[in-house]
Amino acid sequence: MRIAALVLSAAVLVGCTEVQQAVDKTARQGTKGVVSEVLATRFPQVPKPLFETFVDCVIDNSDASEVQTYVKAAVSGVTDATAETVKTVLSRPETQACLSQRALDAGLI
């Protein structure tokens, strides 16, 4: 009986993890417009050939609370707080490495 309960509990946890990952992926995809707007309006120095790379690297290196900030901005509009969140993500070494690697892969540097 206990083994069956443990197996059932493990199956439920795996299912929850898959649902959580799907929700996170959907939220990240939905925030591209917000991050694009922030980069275009608040960071005009982003090179045009690397614009999509910047958007992708920011989203990929944002944590759940930062993604939530972008989702809120999609509903209520971009604010200084949204721009500050993007700036914070851009300053991370992981984001810098992402930008460098993707630009190198694309032959842009």
Image: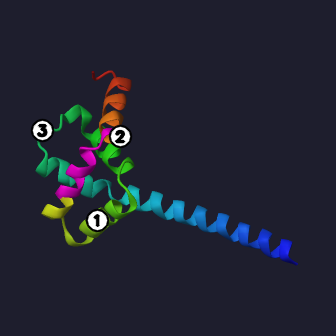
Q: Tell me where residue 68 sits by quadrant.
A: bottom left
- Circle 1 residue: 69
Q: Image height check: is 59 above or below 74?
A: above
Q: Is residue 30 magenta?
A: no
Q: Nearer the viewer, residue 79 or 93?
A: 93
Q: Image height check: is 79 above or below 32?
A: below
Scheme by which the image is coloured: rainbow
- Circle 2 residue: 94
Q: Residue at x 79, y 68 (%)?
A: 7
Q: Quadrant of the C terminus?
A: top left
Q: Tell me where residue 52 sits by quadrant.
A: top left
Give percent across and percent down for residue 87.
20, 50
What separation in Å lies between label 1 and label 3 (alpha carbons)? 23 Å
> Which-is-in-front pick, marks 1 and 3?
1
Stretch in magenta: 83-93
Give percent across and percent down for residue 103.
31, 28
> Which-is-in-front pick, marks 3 and 2?
2
